[in-house]
Image (tube, helix red, strand yellow):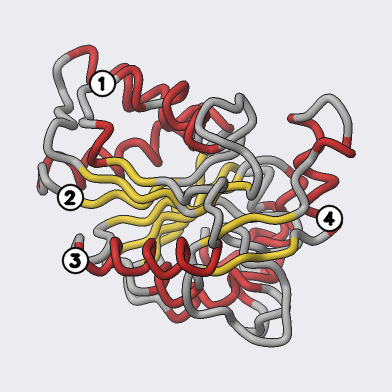
Amino acid sequence: MKLIRAKDYNDMSRKAANVVSATVILRPNCVLGLATGSTPVGMYKQLIAWYEKGDLDFKAVKSINLDEYVGLDAYNDQGYRYFMNENLFNHVNIDKSNTSVPNGMAADVEQECRRYDKHIADLGGVDLQVLGIGNNGHIGFNEPDEAFEQQTHLVDLAQKTIDANSRFFASIDDVPKQAITMGIKSIMQAKAIILLASGEGKADIMETALFGPITPKVPASILQLHPNLTVVADEAALQVVAQKHPELF
């Protein structure tokens, strides 16, 4: 594990964008695994800025998104296809036909999950997977469970996740209760992973996930086993790690 401590959210975003941009520059036809939520927004803004300066070229890049809410289509402003268009795809020269988000409106969710797994395999896997971490340790929408889910699957969202996501909706009753998410196996097969975290609200789970027991009750703990994991987090998110593992800093 490579641990990069940033001063604040903006510094975290720049440092994370450096990792992603290096992948794009070194492998122009790379496959990026992308994440949504508030944490990577700053990173996407930095990538757009570098693209506008002429420093980055996304025309041959392919992307795979981690997850999508069930019941939200590509035009819903709370859906993840919409999020990616608004926060990255509409602002760079990526070919949208090379971008993939699970179909939350699929009539047959199981078939959609198998299609998504095959699509990832057909692309040759993910070169760099971007991850955030939930307050309960979820990555993608892989929630705490009795076993690690291997493949893309339908998940019932934990109440903590629903509560956390309610800030994006007019009412908690509007928050979808299910999602399609890439599984742990798909995530762990990425050639490289970058985990982002910001804010003191993530401080406890970061220490638990990165230094506690590896258990499906803390899905992100599996990342301890990945051979090429980079963690980029600000001081607030790393305060418990710094207290318990000062030798790392």
Mark 4 — residue?
Answer: 160
Residue tagged 2: 30
Badge number at residue 191: none
Marked residue nearer the N-terminal end (3 or 1)? 1
The quarter holding residue 61 reads: top left
- Mark 4 crowd level (few <14, some 14–19, many ≥20, 10 Å Cα): few
Q: What residue is disc 3 on? A: 124
Of tags 2 and 3, the one toward the viewer is 3
Q: Amino acid at mark 3?
A: Gly
In the displayed structure, does residue 156 sit left or right of residue 170?
A: left
Which is nearer the N-term, disc 2 or disc 3?
Answer: 2
Q: What residue appears at the point 57 percent right and 38 percent down from the top-left corner?
A: 39
Q: Amino acid at mark 1?
A: Trp
Residue appearing at x 72%, y 86% in the figure: 146
The span from disc 3 to disc 1 (Cα, nearest Å) is 27 Å
Residue name at image x 26 percent, y 21 percent: 92
Along the horizontal axis of the image, is 93 left or right of 45?
A: left
Calculate the distance from the C-alpha at mark 1 to the C-alpha at mark 4: 36 Å
The percent coordinates of residue 171 (x first, y second) are 88, 30
Q: Are marks 1 and 4 in contact (CB under 8 Å)?
A: no
Q: Which residue is mark 1?
A: 50
Callout 3 environment at 10 Å: few (<14), some (14 to 19), or many (20+)?
few
